Image (tube, rainbow, N blue to C red):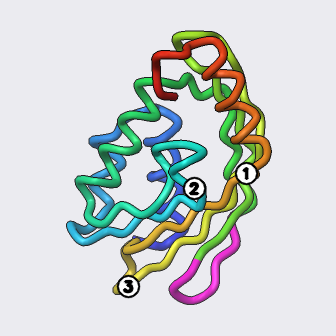
């Protein structure tokens, strides 16, 4: 399979919130880094292993509706891929929404993804989590 096809399938699975389908493309030793300090949001940081990464994604899918996730500007180079993703999420329990751009960098080995590194607008995430905490003081986003 081509890198572009694999990533398009992964992103289609994410848009469908189908974590099982997404997981079919990841090796057991997959590495997922979200560059958000865990003090700002508990889903930030490093997850080693496919199971840990899929658990994080499942939590996001359970807590948020995905309203927009635009992945058309994919850039490919050898065993790497990157893109900026304009996104719009709605917190299911509160209706609170966040619009931001996520930056993804993928690393491939033997044609398959082995690592995803994600960058977020920290100030926007921090503002969102503060609003969410004010609405749901006993819960974690």
Between the residue at mark 3 and the residue at mark 2, the CA separation in whole angstroms equals 28 Å
Q: Earlier in the sequence, mark 1 or mark 2?
A: 2
Density class for disc 2 (Cα within 10 Å; few <14, some 14-19, many ≥20) is some
Q: Which of marks 3 and 2 is nearer the N terminus?
A: 2
Which quadrant, please, contains the N terminus? Answer: bottom left
Identified at 29% across, 52% down, the residue is: 23
Is residue 24 in the magenta section? Answer: no
Q: Is mark 1 on a helix, strand or loop?
A: helix
Density class for disc 3 (Cα within 10 Å; few <14, some 14-19, many ≥20) is few
Residue 56 lies in quadrant? top left
Provide residue 95's location: percent of width, then percent of height.
64, 11
Residue 8 numbered tag: none
Provide residue 10's location: percent of width, then percent of height.
45, 52
Density class for disc 1 (Cα within 10 Å; few <14, some 14-19, many ≥20) is some
Q: Earlier in the sequence, mark 1 or mark 3?
A: 3
Numbered range of the magenta stretch: 74-80
Is residue 77 in the magenta section? Answer: yes
Q: Name the residue under label 3.
A: 109
Identified at 44% across, 80% down, the residue is: 108
Front residue of 43 and 81: 43
Between the residue at mark 1 and the residue at mark 2, the CA separation in whole angstroms equals 9 Å
Between the residue at mark 1 and the residue at mark 3, the CA separation in whole angstroms equals 30 Å
Identified at 70% across, 41% down, the residue is: 125
Identified at 69% across, 64% down, the residue is: 83
Q: Name the residue under label 2.
A: 37
Left or right, residue 50 beside residue 111: left
């Amino acid at each position: 399979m081509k890198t572009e096809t694999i990533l398009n399938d992964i992103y289609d699975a994410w848009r469908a919130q189908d974590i099982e389908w997404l997981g079919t493309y990841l090796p057991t030793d997959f590495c997922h880094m979200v560059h958000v300090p865990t003090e700002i949001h508990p889903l930030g940081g490093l997850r080693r292993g496919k199971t840990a990464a899929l658990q994080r994604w499942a939590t996001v899918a359970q807590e948020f509706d995905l309203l927009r996730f635009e992945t058309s500007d994919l850039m490919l180079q050898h065993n790497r891929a990157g893109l900026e993703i304009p996104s719009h999420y709605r917190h299911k329990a509160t209706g609170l929404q966040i619009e931001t751009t996520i930056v993804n960098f993928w690393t491939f080995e033997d044609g398959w993804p082995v690592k995803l590194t994600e960058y977020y607008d920290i100030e926007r995430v921090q503002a969102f989590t503060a609003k969410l905490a004010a609405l749901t003081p006993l819960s974690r986003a």
